[in-house]
Amino acid sequence: MPVFVRNLNLEFLTENGALKSDRMLGMYEKARWRQAHDAYYLTYTLASGVEFIFKTMRDGEDLRVVGTDTHLSGRCYWNAIPFMNVTPKGSDDLSALIAFTNLAQDGVFLAYLMNAAVLPTIEEGQSIAMQMAAFPQAVALYDSRDEYERAASVSPPDGGQPLILSDKRIFPLNFMLKHDPDVPDEQRDLSLREDILLICGSVVDVQHRTHAEPEDGGAGFLVATITTQFGPLDVAFTSGMVENKECTIGDYLVFSGVLSANVAIERHENWLD
Protein backbone atom coordinates (compact mmCIF):
# COMPACT_ATOMS: atom_id res chain seq x y z
CA MET A 1 0.00 0.00 0.00
CA PRO A 2 1.38 3.47 -0.77
CA VAL A 3 2.51 6.12 1.67
CA PHE A 4 -0.40 8.59 1.82
CA VAL A 5 1.59 11.81 1.60
CA ARG A 6 -1.34 13.99 0.51
CA ASN A 7 -3.95 12.69 2.97
CA LEU A 8 -1.60 12.87 5.94
CA ASN A 9 0.17 16.12 4.96
CA LEU A 10 3.58 14.45 4.89
CA GLU A 11 5.16 16.67 2.24
CA PHE A 12 7.83 17.69 4.76
CA LEU A 13 9.17 14.13 4.51
CA THR A 14 9.57 14.28 0.73
CA GLU A 15 12.05 15.77 -1.70
CA ASN A 16 11.67 15.82 -5.47
CA GLY A 17 8.64 13.56 -5.22
CA ALA A 18 10.31 10.86 -3.12
CA LEU A 19 10.55 10.15 0.59
CA LYS A 20 13.74 11.48 2.16
CA SER A 21 16.04 8.52 2.71
CA ASP A 22 17.68 10.03 5.79
CA ARG A 23 14.32 10.53 7.49
CA MET A 24 13.19 7.02 6.63
CA LEU A 25 16.45 5.59 7.98
CA GLY A 26 16.04 7.59 11.19
CA MET A 27 12.52 6.21 11.68
CA TYR A 28 13.69 2.68 10.91
CA GLU A 29 16.44 2.89 13.53
CA LYS A 30 14.03 4.16 16.21
CA ALA A 31 11.13 1.87 15.31
CA ARG A 32 9.45 -0.59 17.62
CA TRP A 33 9.80 -4.25 16.60
CA ARG A 34 6.97 -6.68 16.10
CA GLN A 35 7.61 -10.36 15.35
CA ALA A 36 5.56 -12.25 12.78
CA HIS A 37 6.78 -15.79 12.13
CA ASP A 38 9.75 -15.38 9.73
CA ALA A 39 9.18 -11.66 9.32
CA TYR A 40 9.45 -8.51 11.41
CA TYR A 41 7.43 -5.33 11.27
CA LEU A 42 9.25 -2.21 12.47
CA THR A 43 6.77 0.54 13.40
CA TYR A 44 7.58 4.21 13.96
CA THR A 45 4.68 6.36 15.15
CA LEU A 46 4.50 10.14 14.78
CA ALA A 47 2.75 12.28 17.39
CA SER A 48 -0.23 12.50 15.02
CA GLY A 49 -0.77 8.75 15.19
CA VAL A 50 0.60 8.18 11.69
CA GLU A 51 2.45 4.87 11.64
CA PHE A 52 5.30 4.04 9.29
CA ILE A 53 5.49 0.25 9.06
CA PHE A 54 8.71 -1.15 7.62
CA LYS A 55 8.10 -4.71 6.43
CA THR A 56 11.21 -6.87 6.72
CA MET A 57 12.14 -10.48 6.04
CA ARG A 58 15.23 -12.50 6.82
CA ASP A 59 17.83 -12.66 4.06
CA GLY A 60 20.52 -14.97 5.41
CA GLU A 61 21.89 -13.28 8.52
CA ASP A 62 20.42 -9.91 7.54
CA LEU A 63 16.99 -8.30 7.41
CA ARG A 64 15.72 -7.03 4.08
CA VAL A 65 13.07 -4.29 3.85
CA VAL A 66 10.50 -5.49 1.31
CA GLY A 67 8.08 -2.58 1.63
CA THR A 68 6.82 0.36 3.67
CA ASP A 69 3.20 1.04 4.63
CA THR A 70 1.47 3.92 6.37
CA HIS A 71 -1.42 3.46 8.75
CA LEU A 72 -3.31 5.69 11.18
CA SER A 73 -3.91 4.62 14.76
CA GLY A 74 -7.37 5.19 16.15
CA ARG A 75 -10.37 3.78 17.99
CA CYS A 76 -12.43 2.32 15.15
CA TYR A 77 -12.59 -1.47 15.40
CA TRP A 78 -14.38 -3.89 13.11
CA ASN A 79 -14.88 -7.64 13.05
CA ALA A 80 -15.30 -9.10 9.59
CA ILE A 81 -15.03 -12.39 7.72
CA PRO A 82 -12.50 -12.83 4.88
CA PHE A 83 -13.66 -14.62 1.75
CA MET A 84 -11.20 -13.75 -1.03
CA ASN A 85 -7.52 -12.82 -1.35
CA VAL A 86 -7.19 -10.21 -4.10
CA THR A 87 -3.62 -9.06 -3.44
CA PRO A 88 -2.32 -7.53 -6.70
CA LYS A 89 0.31 -9.46 -8.63
CA GLY A 90 3.79 -8.09 -8.07
CA SER A 91 3.09 -7.03 -4.48
CA ASP A 92 5.75 -7.67 -1.86
CA ASP A 93 5.59 -10.92 0.11
CA LEU A 94 4.08 -9.23 3.19
CA SER A 95 1.26 -7.39 1.41
CA ALA A 96 -2.34 -8.55 1.67
CA LEU A 97 -5.48 -7.11 0.09
CA ILE A 98 -8.47 -9.09 1.33
CA ALA A 99 -12.20 -9.01 0.56
CA PHE A 100 -14.44 -9.25 3.64
CA THR A 101 -18.10 -9.62 4.50
CA ASN A 102 -20.05 -9.64 7.77
CA LEU A 103 -22.05 -12.31 9.60
CA ALA A 104 -25.23 -11.25 7.83
CA GLN A 105 -23.39 -11.37 4.48
CA ASP A 106 -25.17 -8.19 3.43
CA GLY A 107 -22.07 -6.13 2.76
CA VAL A 108 -18.57 -6.36 1.26
CA PHE A 109 -15.41 -4.33 1.63
CA LEU A 110 -11.75 -4.70 0.68
CA ALA A 111 -8.90 -3.69 2.96
CA TYR A 112 -5.12 -3.74 2.99
CA LEU A 113 -4.03 -5.67 6.07
CA MET A 114 -1.32 -4.02 8.13
CA ASN A 115 0.97 -6.48 9.96
CA ALA A 116 -0.84 -9.34 8.22
CA ALA A 117 1.80 -11.97 9.01
CA VAL A 118 1.06 -11.79 12.77
CA LEU A 119 -2.06 -13.84 12.05
CA PRO A 120 -1.48 -17.60 12.14
CA THR A 121 -3.60 -17.91 9.02
CA ILE A 122 -6.20 -15.94 7.10
CA GLU A 123 -8.96 -18.49 6.82
CA GLU A 124 -12.10 -18.05 4.79
CA GLY A 125 -15.07 -17.79 7.14
CA GLN A 126 -13.06 -17.04 10.31
CA SER A 127 -13.74 -13.59 11.79
CA ILE A 128 -10.82 -11.16 12.14
CA ALA A 129 -10.64 -8.13 14.47
CA MET A 130 -9.16 -4.99 12.88
CA GLN A 131 -8.46 -1.35 13.68
CA MET A 132 -9.64 0.63 10.67
CA ALA A 133 -8.67 3.80 8.82
CA ALA A 134 -9.62 5.18 5.41
CA PHE A 135 -7.61 7.24 2.94
CA PRO A 136 -9.73 8.98 0.28
CA GLN A 137 -8.64 9.82 -3.24
CA ALA A 138 -11.58 12.17 -3.60
CA VAL A 139 -13.87 13.46 -0.87
CA ALA A 140 -17.00 15.61 -0.73
CA LEU A 141 -18.83 17.11 2.25
CA TYR A 142 -22.50 18.01 2.47
CA ASP A 143 -24.56 19.64 5.20
CA SER A 144 -26.86 16.62 5.36
CA ARG A 145 -27.82 13.34 3.72
CA ASP A 146 -30.69 15.14 1.98
CA GLU A 147 -28.30 17.65 0.41
CA TYR A 148 -26.11 14.80 -0.84
CA GLU A 149 -29.10 13.02 -2.40
CA ARG A 150 -30.20 16.19 -4.17
CA ALA A 151 -26.70 16.76 -5.56
CA ALA A 152 -26.26 13.11 -6.58
CA SER A 153 -29.65 12.99 -8.31
CA VAL A 154 -28.46 15.29 -11.08
CA SER A 155 -27.70 13.34 -14.25
CA PRO A 156 -23.97 13.36 -15.11
CA PRO A 157 -22.81 15.33 -18.19
CA ASP A 158 -22.10 12.11 -20.12
CA GLY A 159 -25.79 11.19 -19.96
CA GLY A 160 -25.32 8.22 -17.64
CA GLN A 161 -27.50 7.32 -14.71
CA PRO A 162 -27.00 9.10 -11.37
CA LEU A 163 -25.39 7.01 -8.62
CA ILE A 164 -26.76 7.53 -5.10
CA LEU A 165 -25.02 5.50 -2.41
CA SER A 166 -27.14 3.93 0.32
CA ASP A 167 -26.60 5.46 3.75
CA LYS A 168 -23.67 3.95 5.72
CA ARG A 169 -23.00 1.43 2.98
CA ILE A 170 -19.66 0.49 1.45
CA PHE A 171 -19.89 0.01 -2.29
CA PRO A 172 -17.00 -1.99 -3.86
CA LEU A 173 -17.97 -1.03 -7.40
CA ASN A 174 -14.74 -2.00 -9.15
CA PHE A 175 -14.52 -5.30 -7.27
CA MET A 176 -18.08 -6.13 -8.30
CA LEU A 177 -17.42 -5.27 -11.93
CA LYS A 178 -14.52 -7.72 -11.90
CA HIS A 179 -16.00 -10.61 -9.92
CA ASP A 180 -19.82 -10.47 -9.88
CA PRO A 181 -21.04 -13.50 -11.90
CA ASP A 182 -24.12 -11.52 -12.94
CA VAL A 183 -22.00 -8.91 -14.75
CA PRO A 184 -21.66 -9.79 -18.46
CA ASP A 185 -18.08 -10.38 -19.60
CA GLU A 186 -18.25 -7.47 -22.04
CA GLN A 187 -18.91 -5.11 -19.11
CA ARG A 188 -15.92 -6.27 -17.08
CA ASP A 189 -12.93 -3.93 -16.92
CA LEU A 190 -9.98 -5.91 -15.58
CA SER A 191 -7.84 -2.76 -15.44
CA LEU A 192 -9.94 -1.25 -12.64
CA ARG A 193 -8.36 -0.90 -9.21
CA GLU A 194 -10.60 -3.09 -7.10
CA ASP A 195 -9.18 -1.65 -3.86
CA ILE A 196 -11.01 1.64 -4.52
CA LEU A 197 -14.32 1.76 -2.61
CA LEU A 198 -17.23 4.21 -2.51
CA ILE A 199 -18.26 5.03 1.07
CA CYS A 200 -20.62 7.50 2.73
CA GLY A 201 -21.80 8.27 6.24
CA SER A 202 -22.60 10.93 8.81
CA VAL A 203 -19.71 12.63 10.60
CA VAL A 204 -19.87 11.92 14.34
CA ASP A 205 -16.44 13.25 15.35
CA VAL A 206 -13.73 15.50 13.91
CA GLN A 207 -10.11 15.74 15.04
CA HIS A 208 -7.26 17.92 13.81
CA ARG A 209 -4.03 16.00 14.23
CA THR A 210 -0.53 17.47 13.98
CA HIS A 211 2.79 15.70 13.56
CA ALA A 212 4.78 17.92 15.97
CA GLU A 213 7.94 17.44 13.93
CA PRO A 214 10.58 20.23 13.91
CA GLU A 215 10.45 20.78 10.14
CA ASP A 216 6.77 20.15 9.43
CA GLY A 217 5.71 23.80 9.64
CA GLY A 218 2.73 22.89 11.80
CA ALA A 219 1.44 20.48 9.17
CA GLY A 220 -1.61 18.51 10.14
CA PHE A 221 -4.66 16.78 8.76
CA LEU A 222 -8.28 16.03 9.61
CA VAL A 223 -9.71 12.77 10.90
CA ALA A 224 -13.48 12.61 10.42
CA THR A 225 -15.17 9.62 12.04
CA ILE A 226 -18.25 8.44 10.16
CA THR A 227 -20.81 5.72 10.80
CA THR A 228 -20.90 2.73 8.43
CA GLN A 229 -22.67 -0.62 8.28
CA PHE A 230 -19.52 -2.33 9.64
CA GLY A 231 -18.86 0.16 12.43
CA PRO A 232 -17.27 3.59 12.92
CA LEU A 233 -14.56 4.57 10.44
CA ASP A 234 -11.77 7.16 10.71
CA VAL A 235 -11.27 9.01 7.42
CA ALA A 236 -8.00 10.95 6.99
CA PHE A 237 -7.72 13.92 4.62
CA THR A 238 -6.55 17.52 4.51
CA SER A 239 -8.79 20.57 4.32
CA GLY A 240 -7.34 21.26 0.87
CA MET A 241 -8.98 18.10 -0.45
CA VAL A 242 -12.46 19.55 0.21
CA GLU A 243 -13.80 22.54 -1.69
CA ASN A 244 -15.32 25.49 0.16
CA LYS A 245 -16.43 23.65 3.30
CA GLU A 246 -15.09 23.04 6.78
CA CYS A 247 -15.74 19.56 8.17
CA THR A 248 -17.96 19.59 11.26
CA ILE A 249 -19.95 17.06 13.27
CA GLY A 250 -23.28 16.38 11.58
CA ASP A 251 -21.94 16.77 8.04
CA TYR A 252 -22.41 14.03 5.48
CA LEU A 253 -19.17 12.69 4.00
CA VAL A 254 -18.87 10.85 0.69
CA PHE A 255 -15.58 9.59 -0.68
CA SER A 256 -13.76 7.14 -2.90
CA GLY A 257 -10.62 5.61 -1.46
CA VAL A 258 -8.95 2.65 0.22
CA LEU A 259 -9.24 1.02 3.63
CA SER A 260 -6.34 0.11 5.88
CA ALA A 261 -6.84 -2.53 8.59
CA ASN A 262 -4.34 -3.18 11.38
CA VAL A 263 -4.74 -6.78 12.52
CA ALA A 264 -1.93 -6.65 15.11
CA ILE A 265 -4.33 -5.98 17.97
CA GLU A 266 -5.55 -7.84 21.04
CA ARG A 267 -3.66 -11.16 21.31
CA HIS A 268 -1.79 -10.54 18.05
CA GLU A 269 0.19 -7.43 19.05
CA ASN A 270 3.47 -9.42 19.21
CA TRP A 271 5.72 -6.55 20.36
CA LEU A 272 9.26 -7.65 21.16
CA ASP A 273 9.87 -5.04 23.89
Image (cartoon, grey):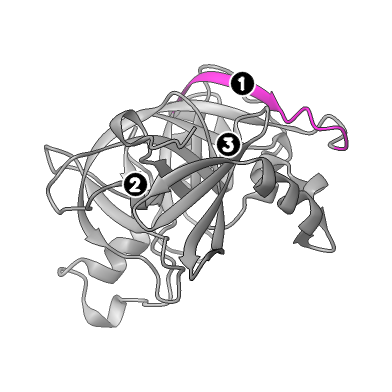
Q: CA distance from mark 2 to mark 1?
A: 30 Å
Sooner in the amino-acid sequence: mark 1 or mark 3: 1
Q: Amino acid at mark 3?
A: Ala
Q: Residues within 10 Å of mark 1 (few under 14, many from 20)?
A: some
Residue 203 position within the rendered picture, expressed as x and y whole percent measured from the top left: 49, 23
User: Label for residue 207?
Assistant: 1
**Going by the image, does 60 lie left or right of 243?**
left
Would you say the magenta stretch is mainly helix, strand or loop?
Answer: strand
Start-end of magenta stretch = 202-215
- Residue depicted at x 57% and y 33%: 141
Sooner in the amino-acid sequence: mark 2 or mark 3: 2
Q: Secondary structure at mark 3?
A: strand
Query: Does residue 196 lie above or below 52 as drawn?
Result: below
User: Label for residue 118?
Assistant: 2
Query: Does residue 160 lie above or below 142 as drawn?
Result: below
Magenta region includes residue 210:
yes
Q: Secondary structure at mark 2?
A: helix
Residue 5 position within the rendered picture, expressed as x and y whole percent measured from the top left: 69, 49
Report the residue marked by disc 3: 236
Q: Nearer the viewer, mark 2 or mark 1?
A: 2
Between residue 206 and residue 15, name the one nearer to us.
15
Q: CA distance from mark 2 to mark 3?
A: 25 Å
Magenta region includes residue 113:
no
Residue 75 position within the rendered picture, expressed as x and y whole percent measured from the top left: 44, 23
Q: Amino acid at mark 1?
A: Gln
